[in-house]
Image (tube, coloured by chain):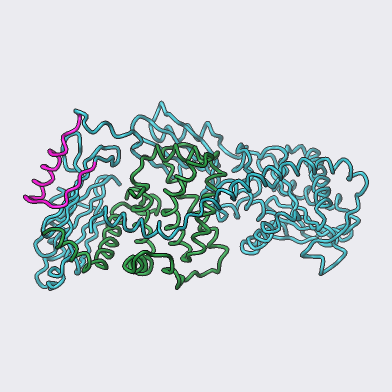
Chain colours: A cyan, B green
């Protein structure tokens, strides 16, 4: 079975199994589009509610669905996340009934403060004040998340707005230019999202509010992963979504996340360019991203030959990863171009190298590999399948691969006594590569295939050989940049 | 009908289609092109037919709604792959911690019994990594070098695992194919 056969075969295996449900996909897409625009509309309406209702009722009624049964006096549950995560349970008169530290940082904040029966405003003042004193909230990290849960959507919304205003005032007094994210957890339409957030919160020991924020961010930024975000502070999450329109669809946001702790895009760009020794980059792009719980700048750019991708630690400017790849976006030029050797010439080179006089099932394709235009040539003789890549410009052999065809006869002679030794196989490969002191050398014997595989590194290249274990013939040799 | 496959269309035509996703015709074309690769990887991760089909649907909905966040890089498949992968893992997280291969995995619709056998072999006998390498190459059209980057491995490992996997598949097909071969070459 040749590559093209198996490719089509495997492709069809999967393709056949996916029924054409395009109509349903399309209608779901349209439906979501409608819902999203309705939600936006709703938020707008909610703002008007503030004016008309806020003056009438400052006393909140009802109970949250997960605390109601336990204590009917709890009206709203409020979660405050910075990095410390604190939960306040409040009654109808806005008095704190219970204060829970949801993580270790929160314990540090609350310590021996007692909020029992204290007005929510006072409690908030003390908590935010303590966060500022202890350095959790400052000019370098200015984001705070408020989540309000109340069975009554309207009341949750009122409470949310009231708290945002309150926190803004407190931060202003401390001369911190804050960024307040806020959300309600009681929206009936989002019931599914909330229960998903609850599961996530339990799994990662974070607040339901933070979990919901993370789900919101991930939904709108498909390249970010939940696992990467759970360990981040609210400011770090806020930084990642900065400047991306629509990246928070269920969360209200005031102010901007502070990036003062970071080296800045300009410096990140310069570090990458200097490292790459590139002076005139094109398509330069710098973006915040996260890697292993650290905020990074992702810097992408190109020059005439390469595409570069850098990850720079946003706090200290260290280069975390750098990657350079040949651009292979340029279209393959006209095959009949004078610059290329002919198909027949390419075939001749491959056949001669393989010493095959009557090849069968020959296929030739022009392709690009690592920026080089090559002819990919496949053919067979009675014993082997061959796979060549010939540089279309100068006719040199880029890779050659030869594999024994599976026949009953080869399987019979599994007698390993006539195998060459592994050191002999190593010697054959090293001689061919003209390398005397290889690194990370690995020799493996595949008895079934009667082949040694020899891999090693040398001088920035990776070598990969397959040696016939009986005859010592080189079946495959590859050399690639590390 | 000539089978449309990702590997047969250029990255830039695919990118065109993708950027044009809000047009129903382009969306449908993309759907037909991408459903097999997306399903294959989803199935490889989720190991359950229904979940994988759900994931296919979710990925297309995400593509449709997130197209504005796509930055044309001439590498549309990388973007689509990341979305597929994240969606699949997010589904996996919501499921039970250990996912066993669904016994009904081969209960999809197959035209021929030999297809069902090959598929079963593919899903059950290949190691997860081998399987992913094969489908990233054959269905997603990634080059071995790109696969190495995706899987955090190196080219030679990917190459040798790929060859080993293909060899296993060929062995499985061995005798039937051999007969066919002999007939062809006469």
Foreground: A338 or B117? B117
| Residue that extends furthest to the right in the rendered view of this protein | A56
Q: Residue at x 45, y 44 (%)?
A: B29
Q: Residue at x 38, y 40 (%)?
A: B11
Residue A335 figure quarter: top left
Q: List x then y, in percent, for residue A353.
A: 10, 47
Foreground: A57 or A365? A365
Q: Residue at x 44, y 39 (%)?
A: B15
| Residue A316 seen by the camera | no
Q: Is residue A355 highlighted in magenta? A: yes
Instruction: Count how many numbered circles sit on residues in the image.
Output: 0
Q: Which residues are magenta?
A: A339-365
Foreground: A168 or A195? A195
Q: From this view, report whether residue A127 is shown above or below residue B66.
A: below
Q: List x then y, in percent, for residue A431.
A: 12, 52
Foreground: A317 or B83? B83
Q: From this view, report whether residue B111 is shown above or below residue B137.
A: below
Q: Is residue B163 left or right of residue A108?
A: left
């Amino acid at each position: 079975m040749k590559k093209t056969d198996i490719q089509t075969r495997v492709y069809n295996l999967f393709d056949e199994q996916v029924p054409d449900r395009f109509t349903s996909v399309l209608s779901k897409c349209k439906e979501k589009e409608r819902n999203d625009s309705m939600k936006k509309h709703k938020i707008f309406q909610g703002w008007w509610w503030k004016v008309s209702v806020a003056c009438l009722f400052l006393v909140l009624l009802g109970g949250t669905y997960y605390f109601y049964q336990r204590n009917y006096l709890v009206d709203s549950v409020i979660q405050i996340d910075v990095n410390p995560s604190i939960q306040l349970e409040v009654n109808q008169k806005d008095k704190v009934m219970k204060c829970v530290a949801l993580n270790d940082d929160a314990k540090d904040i609350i310590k021996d403060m007692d909020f029992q029966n204290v007005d929510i405003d006072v409690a908030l003042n003390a908590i935010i004040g303590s966060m500022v004193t202890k350095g959790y909230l400052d000019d370098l990290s200015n984001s705070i998340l408020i989540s309000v849960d109340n069975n009554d959507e309207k009341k949750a919304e009122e409470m949310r707005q009231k708290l945002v205003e309150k926190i803004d005032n407190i931060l202003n007094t401390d001369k911190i230019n804050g960024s307040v994210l806020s959300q309600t957890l009681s929206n009936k339409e989002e019931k599914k999202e909330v229960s998903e957030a609850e599961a996530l919160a339990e799994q990662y020991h974070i607040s339901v509010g933070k979990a919901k924020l993370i789900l919101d961010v991930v939904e709108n930024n498909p390249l970010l992963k939940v696992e990467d975000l759970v360990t981040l502070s609210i400011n770090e999450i806020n930084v990642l979504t900065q400047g991306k329109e629509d990246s928070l669809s269920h969360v209200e946001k005031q102010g901007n996340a502070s990036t003062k702790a970071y080296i800045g895009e300009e410096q990140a760009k310069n570090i990458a360019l200097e490292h790459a020794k590139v002076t005139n980059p094109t398509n330069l792009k710098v973006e915040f991203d996260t890697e292993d719980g650290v905020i990074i700048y992702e810097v992408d750019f190109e020059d005439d030959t390469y595409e570069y991708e850098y990850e720079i630690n946003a706090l200290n400017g260290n280069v975390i990863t750098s990657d350079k790849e040949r651009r292979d976006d340029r279209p393959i030029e006209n095959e009949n171009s004078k610059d290329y050797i002919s198909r027949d010439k390419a075939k001749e080179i491959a056949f001669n190298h393989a010493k095959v006089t009557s090849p069968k099932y020959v296929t030739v394709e022009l392709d690009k590999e690592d920026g080089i235009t090559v002819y990919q040539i496949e053919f067979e003789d009675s014993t082997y399948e061959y796979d060549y890549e010939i540089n279309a410009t100068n006719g040199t052999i880029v890779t050659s691969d030869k594999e024994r065809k599976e026949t009953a006869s080869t399987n019979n002679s599994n007698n390993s006594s006539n195998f060459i030794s592994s050191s002999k196989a190593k010697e054959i490969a090293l001689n061919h590569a003209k390398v005397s002191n290889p690194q990370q050398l690995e020799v493996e014997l595949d008895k079934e295939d009667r082949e040694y595989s020899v891999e090693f590194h040398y001088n920035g290249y990776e070598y990969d050989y397959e040696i016939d274990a009986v005859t010592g013939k080189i079946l495959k040799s590859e050399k690639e940049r590390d | 009908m000539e089978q449309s496959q990702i590997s047969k269309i250029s990255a830039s035509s695919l990118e065109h289609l993708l950027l044009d996703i809000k047009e129903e015709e382009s969306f449908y074309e993309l759907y037909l092109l991408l459903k097999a690769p997306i399903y294959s990887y989803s199935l490889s991760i989720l190991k359950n037919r229904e979940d994988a089909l759900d994931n296919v649907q979710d990925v297309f909905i995400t593509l449709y709604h997130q197209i504005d966040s796509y930055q044309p890089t001439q590498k549309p498949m990388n973007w689509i792959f990341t979305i597929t992968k994240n969606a699949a893992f997010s589904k996996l997280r919501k499921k039970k911690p250990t996912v066993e291969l669904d016994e009904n995995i081969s209960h999809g619709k197959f035209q021929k019994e030999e297809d069902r056998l090959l598929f079963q072999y593919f899903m059950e006998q290949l190691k997860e990594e081998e399987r992913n390498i094969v489908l990233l190459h054959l269905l997603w059209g990634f080059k071995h070098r790109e696969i190495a980057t995706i899987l955090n491995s190196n080219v030679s490992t990917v190459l040798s695992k790929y060859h080993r996997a293909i060899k296993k598949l060929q062995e499985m097909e061995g005798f039937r194919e051999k007969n066919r071969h002999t007939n062809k070459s006469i």
